Image: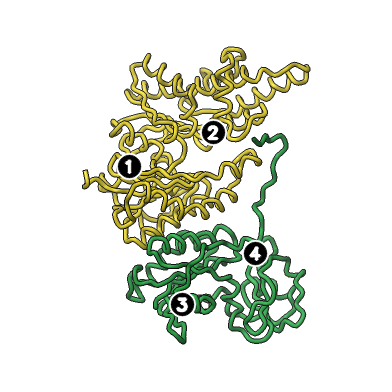
Amino acid sequence: MHVLAVDTSTPATAAAVLDVSDTAVTVVSEHRVVDARAHGESLSPLIAKALAEAGIAPGDLAAIVAGVGPGPFTGLRVGLVTAAAMGHALVVPTYGVCSLDALGAGTNGRVLAATDARRREVYWAVYDNGERVEGPSVDKPADLSLDGVDTAIGDGALLYAEVLGVEVGEEPRYPVLRALVEVAADRVRASAVGELLTPLYLRRPDATPPPGVVVT
Amino acid sequence: MSNEPLVLGIETSCDETGVGIVRGHTLLADAVATSVDQHARFGGVVPEVASRAHLEAMVPTVQRALDDAGVTLDDVDAIAVTAGPGLAGALLVGVAAAKAYALAAGKPIYGVNHLSAHIAVDTLENGPIPAPALGLLVSGGHSSLLLVEDLAGRVVQLGATIDDAAGEAYDKVARLLGMPFPGGPPIDRAARDGDAGAITFPRGLTAHRDMEKHRYDFSFSGLKTAVARWVEARQRAGETVPVNDVAASFQEAVCDVLTRKAVAAAKDHGIDTILLGGGVAANTRLRSMAVERCEKAGIRVRVPRPGLCTDNGAMVAALGSHLVAANVEPSDLGIPADSALPVELVSMVRHEARAL
């Protein structure tokens, strides 16, 4: 069955069509643009391209899998509202997966997955043989306790490699859509009930009530 | 009847998630979810709070509009969406959603201008708009005088506020007077029991010299400050602030300038129809003063009902329907949300770099 996957939790806007069989998840077509300010412009054209290249119509999709972050809010919402609206229009289930899992799931040993959270912080999680054991959280790189962590991956890890003091892999830098769908594959195969795509914001909106405001 | 375009419109430029459906000039659905309550304690719209609310409300509001109209997405001929101007992050949620619906359902998409949509909504109640017409658009984010030569593509801004929007001044004065956000409705209510002639507040940009340089522009920042100074002086003197009189006198100053300049612009351009739109057009004093002054000047004034003056999806659908009927080229899926979309761009065809 064909599945659409999208992730906009990092500067990369990514869309792919994948085939989920009983035993495997295979990428049929995949497109990506790296531009932290262009998620809104890029995503729908990338989806259209991925569908065309896969030779299928939107109506042929059986499910949509979206990375729910954590990630910078504005871009993240583009991916989630796109996935939710397409799921609504096509009447197919949508499944959310933590975007860091698309870096850490399937890794061996103890691995830190970290993406750039701006403001000198990273969104991070720790994986033990591919299973998330800590996070997702947002913190300053120097504040992470990396006991037993062998390697780190993700653009956040690359950005703060010196502070982290562990071996940092060059790739993958951004969430891997095949890995994202692997995490949701059992739900896809079972045609499980879809879920509301709720972003992992991890931070509150920056706003404080000014003095003298009347609330009724 | 059935060959008139059926258009679904999405609006997310501020704190209202609006989804409207129209067929031709007939309103079929106008579903609105608002996050206004979440902004009240901040005394103004918080962009991130608004954006979060848009994401949550989008799919349910689209479904509600489809249910209300008794149509399916397949029935729809086109999707229209506010591409700007407005809050960048808020606009983006609507634009991304509209693209996704258009892509999934195989429909054309029209990224349209929020200000022109405020003008177009009047077609749902009062039919086609004569050309040329003058638009007076007043809301929390805008105060503009528009020359509408052709709603499908030729709209020119004659003037706009050079500082605060009129609605913004209402919010700030309301806060000063201990009234809740948004300030329009409570000031309008208080003003009914006040004397509009009690205090003479300044009329921005109406002095002789200003009328040469800023004939069609507005300024409400000085008015807001004048109200603050006046109230502070009473408080310092230990006097009770006559809240109703302040509200009425402030409101009179705002409406006086808005209607005076609109009538002048219409006369200057030989226009016989003024269209009022935007959230402040729901204000009872602005409506009555506009009618009064336009009648005297022999100008017809058209105002949608208050519920269609504030931001909604029906206005976006109304403009979309007009564009479809006028055979305007749809937008491509690569269009951006443009927080500073110029008035002159009624709809966006593709993503083009434009001079800022």
Evaluate if marks 4 and 1 touch, with contact meaning CB atoms under 8 Å apart: no
Q: Which structural element holds mark 4?
A: loop
Q: Work out which quarter of the rendered image holds the N terminus of chain B and state it.
A: top left
Sequence order check: which comes first, mark 1 or mark 2?
Answer: 1
Q: Colour of chain A?
A: green
Q: For residue B165, which numbered disc appears in the image?
A: 2
Q: Is residue A171 above or below residue B104?
A: below
Residue occupying image coordinates x 57% and y 62%: A199
Question: Between marks 3 and 2, how big is the CA–CA gap?
Answer: 54 Å
Residue occupying image coordinates x 51% and y 65%: A195
Evaluate if marks 3 and 2 touch, with contact meaning CB atoms under 8 Å apart: no
Question: Between marks 4 and 1, how big is the CA–CA gap?
Answer: 41 Å
Residue B224 location, quadrant: top right
Q: Which amino acid does label 4 sit on?
A: Ala
Q: Which structural element holds mark 3?
A: loop
Q: Which chain carries label 2?
A: B
Q: Name the residue under label 3.
A: A190
Position of residue A202 in the picture relative to residue B151 (left or right): right
Position of residue B209 in the picture relative to residue A3 (left or right): right
Evaluate if marks 3 and 4 touch, with contact meaning CB atoms under 8 Å apart: no
Q: Mark 4 points at which residue?
A: A117
Q: Name the residue under label 1.
A: B153
Q: Colour of chain B?
A: yellow
Q: Which amino acid does label 3 sit on?
A: Ala
Q: For residue A175, which numbered disc appears in the image?
A: none
Q: Mark 1 packing: few (<14 Cα in 10 Å), some, or many (20+)?
A: some
Q: Residue B3's x, y, as percent?
A: 21, 47
Evaluate if marks 1 and 2 touch, with contact meaning CB atoms under 8 Å apart: no
Q: Is residue B60 above or below residue B258?
A: below
Q: Which chain carries label 3?
A: A
